[in-house]
Image: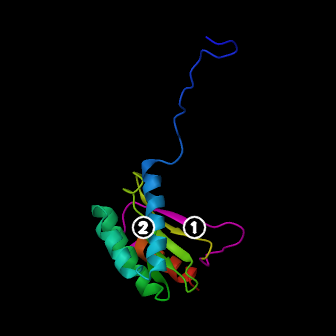
């Protein structure tokens, strides 16, 4: 052994960055950006994303899609990280749906970005957990969507 050389070997560090699901979402986002640039994004992409969801997630996403179309017709459907989303005239996402199955969580989520007009004082909710959609939840979402675009 040469003088000054270490006898220890380098141990590879395990990468603890993005999970496989997070990497898939990032790849979906890149694909979406390309589709938008080519003018191939929109309603069809959202319908395809919804169709690929399992049972309850698909049912809730269909309901949410109908609620947004009825209560905020100015919003444009698009996918965002592979999930249904709805953008304003500037192309900024206002609200989105995230299925429970996507990241293996116990509930789905409807979220609102900073482009949504939901401001209420110094603090307000902008993500909502969804386990099931009934008439009461659909009415609340409709009111939130209307307020978001007001």
Question: In the picture provided, is 42 more to the left or to the right than 95?
Answer: left
Question: In the picture provided, is 95 more to the left or to the right than 54?
Answer: right
Is any part of residue 85 visible from this angle?
Answer: yes
Question: In the picture provided, is 36 more to the left or to the right than 148?
Answer: left
Name which quarter of the figure residue 13 lies in: top right
SS at circle 2? strand
* Residue 115 counted in the magenta span: no
Residue that mark 1 sits on: 126
Q: Quadrant of the N terminus?
A: top right
Is any part of residue 81 visible from this angle?
Answer: no
SS at circle 1? loop
Which of the two residues, 73 or 27, is positioned nearer the viewer here? 27
Q: Which mark is first along the chain, 1 or 2?
A: 2
The spot of residue 6 in percent (x, y) is 64, 16
Which of the two residues, 124 or 35, is positioned nearer the viewer here? 35
The spot of residue 122 in percent (x, y) is 72, 68
Check the image and name the residue furthest to the right: 122
Name which quarter of the figure residue 84 lies in: bottom left
Number of marks present in the image shown? 2
Question: In the picture provided, is 134 more to the left or to the right than 34?
Answer: left
Magenta stretch, main secondary structure class: loop
The spot of residue 69 in percent (x, y) is 41, 84
Label 2–label 1 contact, CB within 8 A? no
Q: Quadrant of the C terminus?
A: bottom right
Q: Which mark is residue 26?
A: none
Relative to 9, residue 55 above or below: below
What is the crowding at mark 1: few (fewer than 14 residues within 10 Å), some, or many (at least 20)? some
Q: Residue at x 41, y 86 (%)?
A: 70
Residue that mark 2 sits on: 83
- Distance, label 2 to label 1, CA atoms, is 17 Å
Q: The magenta stretch spans which residues?
A: 116-136
* Residue 119 counted in the magenta span: yes
């Amino acid at each position: 052994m040469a003088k000054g050389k270490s006898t220890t070997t380098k141990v590879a560090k395990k990468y603890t960055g993005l999970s496989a699901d997070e990497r898939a979402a990032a790849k979906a986002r890149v694909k979406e950006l390309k589709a938008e640039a080519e003018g191939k994004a929109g309603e069809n992409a959202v319908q395809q994303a919804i169709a690929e969801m399992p049972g309850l997630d698909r049912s809730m996403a269909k309901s949410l899609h109908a609620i947004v179309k009825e209560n905020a017709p100015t919003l444009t459907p698009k996918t965002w990280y592979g999930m249904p989303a709805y953008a304003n005239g500037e192309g900024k996402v206002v609200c989105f749906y995230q299925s429970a199955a996507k990241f293996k969580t116990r509930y789905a989520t409807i979220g609102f970005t900073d482009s949504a007009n939901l401001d209420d004082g110094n603090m307000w909710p902008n993500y909502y957990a969804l386990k099931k959609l009934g008439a009461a939840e659909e009415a609340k979402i409709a009111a939130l969507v209307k307020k978001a675009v007001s």
